[in-house]
Amino acid sequence: MKTLTVFAAAAAMVGAASVAQAADPLTLQLKWVTQAQFAGYYVAEAKGFYDEVGLDVTIKPGGPDINPSQVIAGGGADVVVDWMPSALATREKGVPLVNIAQPFDRSGMMLTCRKDSGITQPTDFKGKTLGVWFAGNEYPFLSWMSKLGFSTDGADPDVRVLKQGFNVDPILQRQAECISTMTYNEYGQIIDAGIPESELIVFKYEDQGVATLEDGLYTLEANLQDPAMVDKLARFVKASMKGWEYAIENQEEAVEIVLENDASGAQTEEHQARMLEEVGKLITKTGDEAGRLDPEAYERTVGVLMSGQSDPVINETPEGAWTHDVWEKAMAQ
């Protein structure tokens, strides 16, 4: 009887330890498909950084038919990667998204045009067809056109907007004089398709004063009312920024990790290597500042989105759309 009691006690201790060591589940929804744009999260998972902070993170790739805001609103994720224009527009429509960290502090968005279109400056966009991404990515573009005083709708708009798929076909097939590109993705695709840089001209949103914050981490307001969830989110931010630091410092290994997670098999090592190199240029905050949302950059983004003369992206100054609480808790760990 005594022996059985000892075994029972030992089993109970093992069971209690297992419960205590069980990792907390957390689901991350990405904005787009598996690629080096999200290398930091895949690296954090592969290198055990999430394990180190007691998290079992599920990373869900995005795609053309996946809206991160809708996923989190429907309970399909705890945190999402989204661009701030999309997040703030969604918040104004009733989904209470809150920015808890901002890994990307520079914009990689551009309009890329053929030089033979005659476009040499933004004022030359008038009368031209411009390819634009939608699904929330159109907001910075619309604010820019409004700033230029160009209409984009109606029977005879100043600028014809072509709803661009997530490819570079419109400029290759001359359906548009300019198309939307990211420094780390589509611009390289155009060159790979045979159009040399010497025949292209680019207009970076950063240079035009209409840059808005892109890949940030968002959760719902309700999650921030739960201390246990705030703790999980803080651990997630801490480990994710460690993943980003590792990815940028070890790009060859990080690319391999991304490719291992690409279930589609569509990505190539060359393209992902170039992407990660460019993505690294958009993450300038490191060390104790890594992932911290810059309030001035936030205010600039809000200003751009509210600058539309007749049809602003958001109509009211957001309240409670960001917090440093999670980030500060993460950095204190």
Image (cartoon, helix red, strand yellow):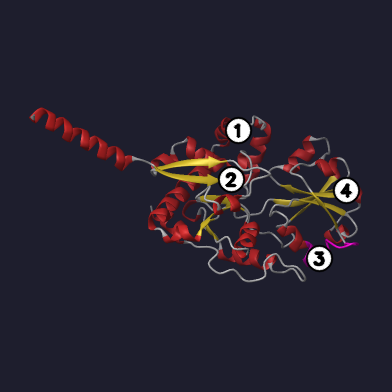
Q: Judge by depth and name the residue closer to the eye, 96 or 193.
A: 96
**Which of the marked residues, 1 or 4, is nearer the chain's N terminus?**
4
Tell me, yes or no, if residue 198 can be seen here.
no
Cβ atoms at labels 2 and 1 below 8 Å apart: no
Q: Main secondary structure of the magenta part?
A: loop
Residue position for label 1: 262
Q: Which residue is mark 4?
A: 115
> Are discs 3 and 1 less than 8 Å apart at CB?
no
Q: Of tags 4 and 3, which is closer to the observer?
A: 3
| Vertical arrangement, residue 268 with respect to residue 31, above or below | above
Amino acid at circle 3: Leu
Tag 2: amino acid: Leu
Single out the mark in the foreground, 2 or 4. Answer: 2
Q: Secondary structure at mark 1?
A: loop
Work out whether 233 lies above or below 64.
Answer: below
Q: Where is mark 3, residue-wise?
A: 148
Q: CA distance from mark 3 to mark 1?
A: 40 Å
Q: CA distance from mark 2 to mark 3?
A: 32 Å
**Closer to the eye: label 1 or 4:** 1
Q: Earlier in the sequence, mark 2 or mark 4?
A: 2
User: Measured from the top left, where is residue 306 in percent x and y?
Assistant: 69, 68
In magenta, the rendered stretch is 145-157
Is residue 149 shown in magenta?
yes
Q: Nearer the viewer, mark 2 or mark 3?
A: 2
Residue 30, which numbered label? 2
Q: Position of residue 90 (x, y in %)?
A: 62, 60
Residue 103 is tagged as none
Q: Secondary structure at mark 2?
A: loop
Alpha carbon separation for disc pair 2 and 4? 34 Å
